[in-house]
Image (cartoon, helix red, strand yellow):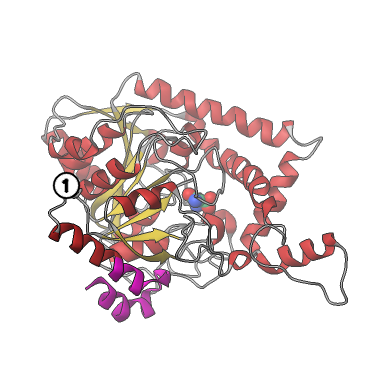
Amino acid sequence: AHLDRIDAVDGAVHAYLHVAPELALAAAARVDAQIAAGEKLGPLAGVPIAVKDVLVTTDMPSTSGSKILEGYLSPFDATVVKKVREAGLIPLGKTNMDEFAMGSSTEHSAYGPTHNPWALDRIPGGSGGGSAAAVAGYEASIALGSDTGGSIRQPAHVTGTVGVKPTYGAVSRYGAIALASSLDQIGPVSRTVLDSAMLQDIIGGHDPRDSTSLRTEWPSMADAVRGANVQGLKIGVIKQLQGDGFQAGVLNRFTEALELLVANGAEIVELDAPSFEHAIAAYYLILPAEASSNLAKFDSVRFGLRVNPQGGGTVEDVMSATRDAGFGPEVKRRIILGTYALSAGYYDAYYGSAQKVRTLVQRDFAAAFSQVDVIASPTAPTTAFKLGEKLNDPLAMYLNDIATIPANLAGIPGITLPAGLADEDGLPVGIQFLAPAHEDARLYNVGGALE
Ligand code: GLN
């Protein structure tokens, strides 16, 4: 049914970069055989899943949305892919994304944009617009995404789906093509909070192949949803995440969701987070710095594309021609920004200052969580904007991330779930909750209570 749906709508939506019908049907047949043999299967066995192209796979190409990796086949599966296969989920294909996960609209994909199934002239969010559109458009039951500054949560917000960025280190990053290693986290995209919880239960846990993987013993996230109860829960609302620049319809749905929680016994506490004002500026220095280093490995020798300059040339000429042809404009912009911020003489002024702001953001969260159990905010300032609207204005695109970036800078978990449709345009609006590190279950509790 999902493959038929993909055939019917993906020409218009373009959620997938690669669909693998034969592999999917073979995996489904294996699950059928297990059922016939009376094997006890996990709760998501047989469920079709879409996989963001940032995650490497042995049997499908992994491009991270870039021409430099066109056709690249990995010799191993990302740990999360291995885990979902072992749990009997059925990968349908690889989903579209902004090149190397840089963007908020999926328009920076080297393979053309994804369209929002709610309105095809609108962006599906980014960088994981493909995964969110696949789930929203019923082209997959559930999906995997990656969130470095909001790439799971913001696409979920604009497509009326659920998205979770787990605590940094809760889910293995092994086999996730790195954007910014200190910010990247893999997580679920789904239509219900319970679906995301069940997927996080499968993909979470320690992985010796990821040096930042936590050894935490995690409680069942699915149980947190099933036993949801917000009686007496203290919910913080941050002043800096609801004022100027936030669309009225987004704020209206946010206020209504809070009222619902209060009606169910939660208490609202107003909070101040002064450093959030500088979070975007800090993020857009730290991210390019780390990305410029991570992307240095695409050198025409080790992976993917190789372009030979006309008339030959040195190794450096080949490298330069390859990177010139293989990387798109946003990737080049960030490599230049990042290498500049890291260069001798500028390091303290740019990278050093950004790291200080990162510490201040962490302190703001620590102060907040000494008063409340979770924090609530709109997930993004606006509903889905029109394709092309911000494409030539990088700063406008970056400002969209104001509410999602702080969680990545602090390594804490965040969830977004649908809060209804905006009055102005009838497009989906999400509400975001944040919790202290290791407290992912709190998010599933609140999400479960609202759903
Ligand atoms: N919009 C953010 C950026 O462009 C989010 C990236 C992400 O989470 N991968 O960096």
| x 46%, y 53%: residue | 77
Which residue lies most toward the front here? 37
Mark 1 is surrounded, within 10 Å at the Cα level, by few (under 14), some (14 to 19) or many (20 or more) other residues, namely: few
- Principal secondary structure, stretch drawn in magenta: helix
Does the magenta run of residues contain 225?
no
Q: Which residues are magenta?
A: 1-26
Image position of 180 with respect to 111: above or below: above
Q: Of 224 and 429, which appears nearest the observer?
A: 224
Quadrant of the rendered image containing residue 217: top left
Specify whether 439 is left or right of 215.
left
| x 37%, y 39%: residue | 166
Quadrant that contains the N terminus: bottom left
Specify whether 84 is left or right of 37.
right
Does the magenta run of residues contain 7?
yes
Specify whether 403 is left or right of 71.
left
| x 36%, y 47%: residue | 379
Q: Is residue 152 visible?
A: no
**Whole-percent x, y for residue 111 in the image:** 52, 72
Q: Of 439 and 253, which appears nearest the observer?
A: 439
**Whole-percent x, y for residue 343 in the image:** 78, 40
Q: Secondary structure at mark 1?
A: loop
List the residue tagged with mark 1: 451
**Whole-percent x, y for residue 219 in the image:** 25, 30
Q: Of 253 and 303, which appears nearest the observer?
A: 303
Name the amino acid type tagged 1: Glu
